Image (cartoon, grey):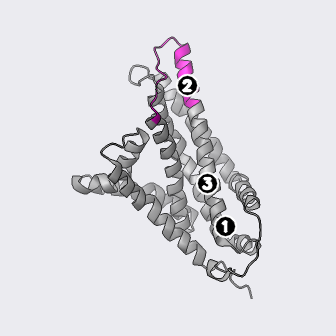
Amino acid sequence: MITATPTVASTAHLGPGIPFTCSLRVEWRKSIDTRAARWLLAAVVAISVIAAIVPIATPNSSDQDLSNYLAIMAIGVTLLLPVVSILTLTSEWSQRTVLTTFTQDPRRDRVLAAKLTVGLGLAAIGGLAGLAIASAGLQISDALGRPVSWDVGSSELVGYGLFVLLSSLMGMAFGALLHNTAAAIAAYSAIPTLITIVAVPFAAIRDWVDSATTSNWILHGEWSGHSAQILTSVGIWVLLPLLVGLSRTLRRDAN
């Protein structure tokens, strides 16, 4: 009879185990070395390129500056990249290979740390690639003889980076919480949108629970006067599901 692997509460007696750097390499390979992940990453690149083409093709209605290009690029990058991050937390549960993972390394906390690090690493790479594509798009616009501006505030650059990282972290939070790829993707996509629609008539609470509003503030670096609302929204949509999800993963039987 197959028994469940030890949970975090029963692994205190274990030795050093697998080095964390080895866990990182394994999780990195698993996150990108599947057909689904490769297609998703290819789609992220394609959508990012299309996102850069949009302001080039609409010079009369799109500001030809790096700030605007980055704002458009952020949407392109985060359209599918969080799905890749979701897969890092759900694929093994969905494919019933999680028992193998936690048998090879029973220290679930370290496995989860490696998965989260890989997910954020992919987000960081995606964000930097988006920045490069946006800059190339603006360079093309400049080469076409249009007046362009390369000025962008540090708050906007930080906001762009946080927007991309938090989007992927939110995806991983739902993945850790639900342990099912389809359910996590649906919840990540639908629940915040539903809350946005429901919260529209309630202006007093909308800015505190509507992730679309607070994400827009983050993206444009508009922290002044909105810090409390942003932190509350991040707590609701990222930190709370992530903590509950990690706790569930640490305790759930893997049989």
Residue position marked by numbered label 1 in the rendering: 110
Query: Callout 1 environment at 10 Å: few (<14), some (14 to 19), or many (20+)?
Result: some
Q: Position of residue 72 (x, y in %)?
A: 47, 34
User: What's under tag 1, amino acid-wise?
Assistant: Arg
- Side of 70 relative to 110 (left or right): left
* Crowdedness near tag 3: few (<14), some (14–19) or many (≥20) residues, C-alpha within 10 Å: many
Callout 1: SS: helix
Residue matched to label 3 = 119
Q: At 72% from the left edge and 82% from the top edge, which residue is drawn?
A: 13
Relative side of 234 to 25, left or right: left
> Which kind of residue does numbered mark 2 sit on?
Gly
Camera-nearest label, 2 or 3: 3
Residue 106, x across and y down, in percent: 71, 75
- Nearer to us: label 1 or label 3: 1
Q: Position of residue 79 (x, y in %)?
A: 51, 45
Q: In front: mark 2 or mark 1?
A: 1
Amino acid type, label 3: Gly
Identify the element where label 2 is drawn.
Answer: helix
Earlier-in-chain disc, 2 versus 3? 3
* Range of magenta residues: 133-154
The residue sitting at 57% across, 48% down in the picture is: 81
Q: Nearer the viewer, residue 4 or 155?
A: 155
Quadrant assignment for the C terminus? bottom right
Label placed on residue 137: 2
For image coordinates 47% across by 18% down, the residue present is 148
Sequence-first tag of 2 and 1? 1
Give how far across and how far down residue 242 sits, in percent: 50, 64
Quadrant housing residue 191: bottom left
